[in-house]
Amino acid sequence: GAVVSQHPSRVICKSGTSVKIECRSLDFQATTMFWYRQFPKQSLMLMATSNEGSKATYEQGVEKDKFLINHASLTLSTLTVTSAHPEDSSFYICSAFSGTSGHIYFGPGTRLLVL
Amino acid sequence: GDSVTQMEGPVTLSEEAFLTINCTYTATGYPSLFWYVQYPGEGLQLLLKATKADDKGSNKGFEATYRKETTSFHLEKGSVQVSDSAVYFCALRSTGANNLFFGTGTRLTVIP
């Protein structure tokens, strides 16, 4: 089946630094990718929808200047957490929509810890 | 707006017990409904889905029926196994949309 990868799987950084998370669709082209944030024991909260070649659409309450999303190709989207703070520590999950199958596939997630 | 309300966990069952995880939804139109499973250390995987009222999704012994009259999509399995231990998420996708709305997830632990 279709596979979506995320890199890194786990990252620890110092407060004030920026962290980039990559999301790749490995065997299909994804015109749309989604970024979610998952807090412990809570649901996945959609942060933004990323369409290839255009600006991301952010959900209400998500700071677009803090969470920079780039979807430069049909197989890669990146999320950059700028000037990270401890409250940004969370599990970030991406998913990719396959126009061919009509299905959404999820990446394994990236755990971010900001010290 | 669209939302999903899911039974809170955690749920602990003995092997071969019957499982029900409740899920109800609020949506305009006719959404598609999904159950996703997240095994430890892995990403979400689609378990089953239903796209219209009265459809029954099934996979790996799990079943869920799209009940429009009760706006529900409860997950059931007649006999759980230790390998079913995971977090289960109910989700919906609105008509014409690509994104998913998720419930809070229910952690299931099956003990031998």
Image (cartoon, coloured by chain):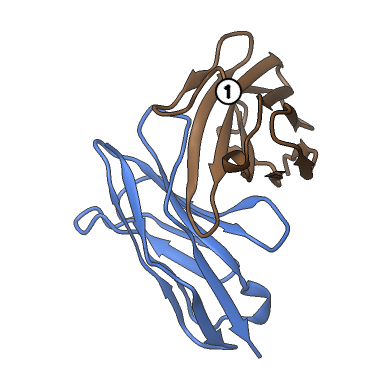
Chain that appears blue: B
| Residue depicted at 48% across the width and 19% down the height | A57
Q: In terms of depth relative to the viewer, which is nearer, A60 or B29?
A: A60
The spot of residue A36 in percent (x, y) is 55, 38
Q: What is the quadrant of residue B59 in the picture?
A: bottom right
Q: In terms of depth relative to the viewer, which is nearer, B72 or A112?
A: A112
User: Tag 1, which chain?
Assistant: A
Q: What is the quadrant of residue A61 in the picture?
A: top left
Give the color of chain A as drawn: brown
Quadrant for the N terminus of chain B, please.
top left
Work out whether A105 lies above or below B74: above
| Residue B27 left/right relative to A34 | left
The spot of residue A13 in percent (x, y) is 77, 38
> Where is mark 1, residue-wise?
A66
The spot of residue A59 in percent (x, y) is 43, 27
Quadrant for the C terminus of chain B, please.
bottom right
| Residue depicted at 52% across the width and 19% down the height | A64
Q: Which amino acid does label 1 sit on?
A: Lys
| Residue A7 left/right relative to B49 | right
| Residue depicted at 70% across the width and 18% down the height | A74
| SS for dot 1 | loop
Q: How crowded is mark 1: few (under 14 residues within 10 Å), some or many (20 or more)?
A: some
